[in-house]
Image (cartoon, rainbow, N blue to C red):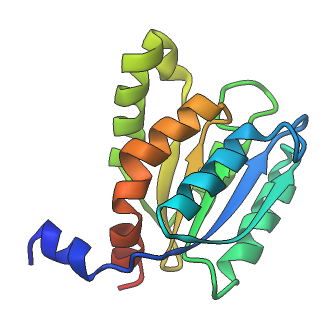
Amino acid sequence: MSVNEHKAQASHSVGCFVITVSDTRTDDTDTGGRAIVDLLTKAGHTVAGRTIVKDDPELVRGTIERQLANPQVQVIITTGGTGITSRDSTYEVVSGLLQKTLDGFGELFRMLSYEQIGSAAIMSRATAGLVAGRIIVSLPGSEGAVRLAMERLLIPELGHLAQQAAR
């Protein structure tokens, strides 16, 4: 079956949960999380919920694990905590949970990011993969990075990703 045939058979509405990882963001200042929700909704996907958690590995892991148990959630998208500072822990948490990685996601994201911000793209640890038949994607916290990843990579493939992950 071709990629186009797979995409044609994929669901056009995927259940998603958005987690912002930040010590400083609030509902009012979480522009990245809000952008993810807006872009998912405009593309016809369902947002089962959204939350902000402190950049603490146990809090991040617990929040992700709760959503992995939620039958309405096929995709978990995190934003924030993917940098290289001592407080950034999302990459370690998500990487530790992944059963399969989607290496191409991070590679393509950094390539696209390089076109926009230059060599600073090497500091991005955006990643994606599968856990228990669900997709987890970790994006940087900036709204620009979120929009880039969502518009160029995730929205075009989300139904197809969820379909393949559930098989």
Residue 35's spot in the image, x, y percent? 64, 46
> Which residue lies most toward the left here?
1
Q: Residue at x 61, y 57 (%)?
A: 77
Task: Say above or below: 167 vs 153.
Answer: below
Which quadrant of the figure has residue 124? top right
Q: Residue at x 52, y 60 (%)?
A: 42
- Is 128 positioned to the left or the right of 97 in the image? left
Q: Residue at x 52, y 70 (%)?
A: 45
Residue 158's spot in the image, x, y percent? 41, 64
**Quadrant occupied by the N terminus:** bottom left
Residue 65's spot in the image, x, y percent? 73, 72
- Is 27 positioned to the left or the right of 90 in the image? right
Residue 79's spot in the image, x, y percent? 67, 45
Which quadrant of the figure has residue 68? bottom right
**Quadrant occupied by the C terminus:** bottom left
Which quadrant of the figure has residue 4? bottom left
Task: Say above or below: 58 vs 127.
Answer: below
